[in-house]
Image (tube, coloured by chain):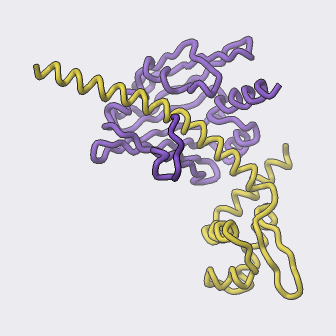
Chain colours: A yellow, B purple
Amino acid sequence: MVQFHSSVDASFAALSDPTRRGVLEQLGRTEASISELADKFHMTLTGMKKHVSVLEQAGFVTTVKVGRVRTCRLGGRGLDEEAAWIERYRQTWAARFEELDKVVEQLKRKEQSDGRKANE
Amino acid sequence: MDAKPTSEQVQGPVTTTDRHSDREVVVTRTFDAPARIVFDAWTTPELIMKWWTPKSFGITFISCEADVRVGGTYRFVMGHPAFDQPMTFHGRYLEVEPPRRLVWTNEEGGEEGSVTTVTFEEKDGKTHLVLRDLYPSKAALDEAMASGSINGYPEQFNQLDILLKAR
């Protein structure tokens, strides 16, 4: 449990930065080298290396170095745990809201028919 | 819901969920009704009972009390066939501003419970709803995530249901 908590902490820290969230979004579409990411986000290679390193430590990204190119892609478990929880959260409320739609629809119809009666 | 959606456009209203900070989760949804109607559905016990526990959760209300005024309390008691004891969810309303804003505490988890803020913003006869669950600390939200619970309960029941069905 302690391990899980520290991994969640690292995840939150990693996701607190808009550039790092952008990098994740980008890697969600396709893998990329650090220099490609640096270009894309108008940063120095060193700056991007730091961001990728934070994402890697948090378990969001894995990198593989082939020759002189380090390729980054989404990976690790951290994102899965959080994304799964957030998705369940969404599903919980989405299910409730579908039922709420029905209640709201009934109330609307009742209000309309009450309104018609009042006008008669 | 027999119609098979072919794209996002025909799937109806979208529920979004985002973690806005390390201790806050935000849910949004738009309803096709004026705010006063949606607000009523959140503040009238007989109406809450109709939608708060969809069938898929596998839980049913035993009782639902809600004294919706500042300082008033609510108490939802629910049962599930797999549990001998009913579960009680309770808290206090901190802000009540019909039909715009509702804030309550979730106290069943003790000090670690979230404070839920719901705002109802009406535009062109529709209501944009924003629900914020603010946990007292990062650790409290971590704990909720670690336990897999959503506001303390539905997911645990939901998961249990899946488990039972799988047997």
Residue A26 image point, x, y percent: 65, 71
State the residue at coordinates (77%, 70%). A73
Left-right relation of B93 to B161: left
Point out the image quarter for the N terminus of chain A: top right
Point out the image quarter for the C terminus of chain A: top left
Seen in the picture, residue B84 relative to A50 is either above or below; the reply is above
Splitting the image into 4 quarters, where does residue A65 fall?
bottom right
Seen in the picture, residue A19 relative to A11 is either above or below; the reply is below
Residue B10 image point, x, y percent: 46, 48
In this orientation, which residue lies closer to the viewer: B1 or A109? B1
Seen in the picture, residue B78 relative to B157 is either above or below; the reply is above
Left-right relation of A48 to B99: right
Splitting the image into 4 quarters, where does residue A85 fall?
top right
In this orientation, which residue lies closer to the viewer: A108 or A77? A108
Left-right relation of B68 to A32: left
Splitting the image into 4 quarters, where does residue B118 fall?
top left
In this orientation, which residue lies closer to the viewer: B19 or B79? B79
Residue B49 image point, x, y percent: 49, 20
State the residue at coordinates (55%, 35%). A95
Q: Which residue is the extreme one toward the left?
A: A120
State the residue at coordinates (71%, 12%). B85
- Examine the rendering and report whether any part of residue B110 can be seen: no
Residue A71 image point, x, y percent: 80, 77
